Amino acid sequence: MTKPLVKVRDLKMHFPIYAGLLRRQVGAVKAVDGVSFDILEGETLGLVGESGCGKSTCGRAVLRLYDITGGEITIDGRAIGAEDQRSLRAMRPTMQMVFQDPQACLNPRMTVGAIIGEPLMEHTGLSGAERTDRVRELMDQVGLNRAFINRYPHEFSGGQRQRIGIARALALNPKFIVCDEPIAALDVSIQAQVVNLLEELQDSLGLTYLFISHDLSMVRHIADRVAVMYLGKVVELAPRDALYGEPLHPYTEALLSAVPEPDPAMAGNKRQRIVLQGDVPSPANPPQGCNFCTRCPKVMDICRKIDPDFHEVKPGHWAACHLHDLD
Ligand code: SF4
């Protein structure tokens, strides 16, 4: 049986709010508020939710791009939740990130060779010639023409720039990659190519992914298991087919009811569209009890008082909802 490569327990990432002349802390934005999950070796865990639900912050916090507020993170057997940024440096090769907007994260003044080779400079003792060989190898791996090694990012299309970002993330042979909305900024025609590339690389290199996206159709395609986030918390986590076939949490039901059915033969079986009323509450002032109680079509009295436990309702299928306390 495969073991977890990544373990996250009760992860919290709160950003303080300061106000007044003395800049006193008057509250906190609870962007991630007690999230727990495992990611097995070689698996893709999809993390979905509306924008602003905290999924990108969660991905960055798992890689310790932030100093987290609380919780435990273990990656490849090493607890990194409390480590300072200097000691984390040795772990950086193992864990990498592919960002949403390749345009924004590639230095326009550096050639592709320098961009992909930068982590090799930072973390390895390779000579210049060895680095160039490795960069060419990486360009082959991600489907970029190695003859373009001296070109600049603006000379590439959006899809090619994302391939540059992926090659850079692969440079140090990572085991775990957080893909933060890696296709959201790309034309629809290019999205499938990049997702297929990520899948091929996973198969050939044995990579483990946390794939963050608001696109439920794409997550259904790529993920083995899926976690659904709402207002800083994971409200449901299950193997892909169980989650899409039989969602347990009312929020997941509402999200899935809005996904178009690609197969015309199945279109008649499509669930009824659930339109949620009201806005997502502020993460600085989440509601008491269940954080979905202000919008939930199935809300009960208990929901406004007691925050439901995130518990295993069926084998491997977790949810945080009082409806399933009653089972
Ligand atoms: Fe809805 Fe209550 Fe379940 Fe929250 S606990 S999702 S409010 S039914």
Image: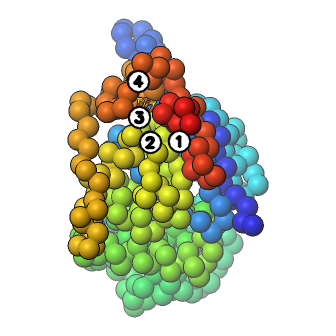
- Marks 1 and 4 sit apart, C-alpha to C-alpha, by 16 Å
Q: Position of residue 124 (x, y in %)?
A: 67, 70
Q: Earlier in the sequence, mark 3 or mark 4?
A: 3
Q: Position of residue 46 (x, y in %)?
A: 48, 57
What type is the residue that disc 2 sits on?
His
What type is the residue that disc 4 sits on?
Met
Q: Is 201 located above or below residue 250 in the figure?
A: below
- Marks 1 and 3 sit apart, C-alpha to C-alpha, by 15 Å
- What's the colour scheme? rainbow
Circle 3 is placed at which residue position? 231
Q: Is 212 located above or below residue 33 in the figure?
A: below
Q: Is mark 4 within 8 Å of ligand 1?
A: yes
Camera-nearest label, 4 or 2: 4
Q: Earlier in the sequence, mark 1 or mark 4?
A: 4
Circle 1 is placed at which residue position? 319
Camera-nearest label, 1 or 3: 1
The one of 206 and 143 positioned closer to us in this rendering = 206
Q: Is mark 2 within 8 Å of ligand 1?
A: yes
Q: Earlier in the sequence, mark 1 or mark 3?
A: 3
Circle 2 is placed at which residue position? 249
The one of 218 and 305 positioned closer to us in this rendering = 305
Q: Are marks 1 and 3 in contact (CB under 8 Å)?
A: no
> From where the camera sits, is residue 45 visible?
no
The one of 7 and 186 positioned closer to us in this rendering = 7
Local crowd size for mark 3, using a 10 Å CA cut-off: few (<14), some (14–19), many (≥20):
many
Residue found at the very far top of the displayed protein: 21
Q: Report the quarter where the C terminus lies.
A: top right
- At a point 36% along the width and 9% down the height, the residue shown is 20
Camera-nearest label, 1 or 4: 4
Ligand 1 picture quarter? top left
